[in-house]
Image (tube, helix red, strand yellow):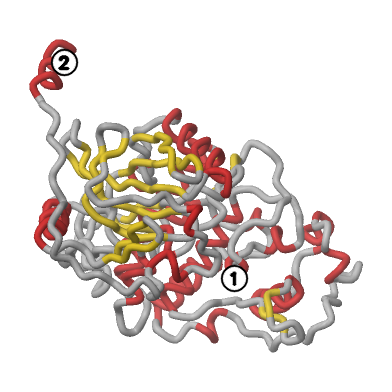
Amino acid sequence: MSFISRVWNQLGRRALRPRSFANPNFTRLPPDQGIEEETLPDYLPQRYYPVRIGEVFADRYQVVGKLGYGATSTVWLARDLSQRRHVALKVFIRSQALGDHLENEMAMFKRIEQRPSDHPGRDAVRTLLDSFQVKGPDGDHLVLAHPPLWRSIEAIIRRTNPRRLPPSGLRYVLKELFLALDYLHRECNIIHTDIKADNIMFSISDTSVFTDFEEAEVREPSPRKELDGRTIYLSRILKSTGMVGPPVLCDFGSAVFGDTEHRECVQPHVYRAPEVTLEALWDYKIDIWNVGCMIWDIFEGAQLFNGIDPEHHAYRRRAHLAEIIALLGPPPKDLLARGHLARKFFSDEGTYIGGLQVPDPTPLESLEELLAGEDKRRFLEFMQKMLQWDPEKRASAAELQQDPWIQEPIEGQLAESPRGVAKDVSRG
């Protein structure tokens, strides 16, 4: 299409007018009933921007309903009036309360946008469409506009019994996740550091669900409560069509650039790599360990590690290291030589001296109970490529994406990359 044709099309596409969401027939919740973000442990109302359904941001995005909430933001479905499409708006809490978190996330998205877009993993990483600031009653708030996504893996697992993904559903997710990580690691030099079931969401191939969501809000407004001049809404769930699009890796607030040295403490406790626990220099291979632990969690339905110290009844490094020893045996001495905290937990000979009894050896073979025969053998070989003390012995994301267990044909879908293919992951 020529430049003149593109300009003509843009001029001919008139912006939509904002809709009215003034239907008074909604359920009024009791003011003393805590809902949504109010139930979070550190909730402070002054930190949150008081979004109202029907509000228009940046003279462009009209909020049509609430999708969710978290400790650092609320998420809303909005109609982009100028582009005639729906977007997800992530409205962060007051910027002063987040410190460097926002600048860090924006820096990651900026680098992603600057890198090549023809890598197959680019579409498996969340896209930033727009960003802007809004002024609230208690400070400024950053707003990010993204393509809307469906539920996270965590949300899907919570609705299944047993609470785990079947083998074909797991393969469907991992093919895309490893493409995303290969793109981030090799093309962008970004280390995610926080890969978990909450941060992997499924795309939506049937966009009619957004229109249905909007129309439902007009007809039957969401229940809400009014408190101190603020309206707090209950989230509305996007309708399920029974099928989902490919998964997308989200949330780059904790990500770091891989072209600088890192020794800081990162990652969720139960997914923390040994080199992070020992405060040795670490790189993108911590993401690989992280994924291995998460896979066990969402497939086997149990965590490999919890790191709970029996004396303190809370996470402690010494307890986590003891659990890793039980699974993988003692750590290699060259890793201990690089760790600033190694002498606190290990002798010069590499013996554990952390002050706890190391659990009895529990190899992966004895823990895996869902598979059998050749399938079990190949799955365990795949897992062992990630769960290694020595980061250098862990496979890369590109190698894992081509692993024989991952590449087994998935019944009911195309054998090649699932990009663009819908899948019922809960049934496999």
**Residue underneath mark 2:** 7
Tag 1 residue? 270
Between circles 2 and 1, the one closer to the viewer is: 2
Q: What kind of element bears circle 1?
A: helix
Q: Count neighbours of disc 2 (C-alpha within 10 A) and say few if under 14, some if 14 to 19, many if 20 or more.
A: few
Give x and y (percent) for residue 245: 24, 55
Spot occupied by residue 361 in the image (x, y as percentages of width and height)? 67, 85
Question: Image check: 71 left or right of 270?
Answer: left
Q: Position of residue 420 (x, y in %)?
A: 22, 49
Q: Residue at x 69, y 64 (%)?
A: 274
Residue toward you, 31 or 71: 31
From the top left corner, tell me how far across and down residue 352 is, in percent.
82, 76
Mark 1: amino acid:
Val
* Nearest to the observer: residue 330 or residue 242: 242
Q: Label 2 vs label 1: CA separation? A: 52 Å
- In this picture, residue 38 sits left or right of residue 344: left
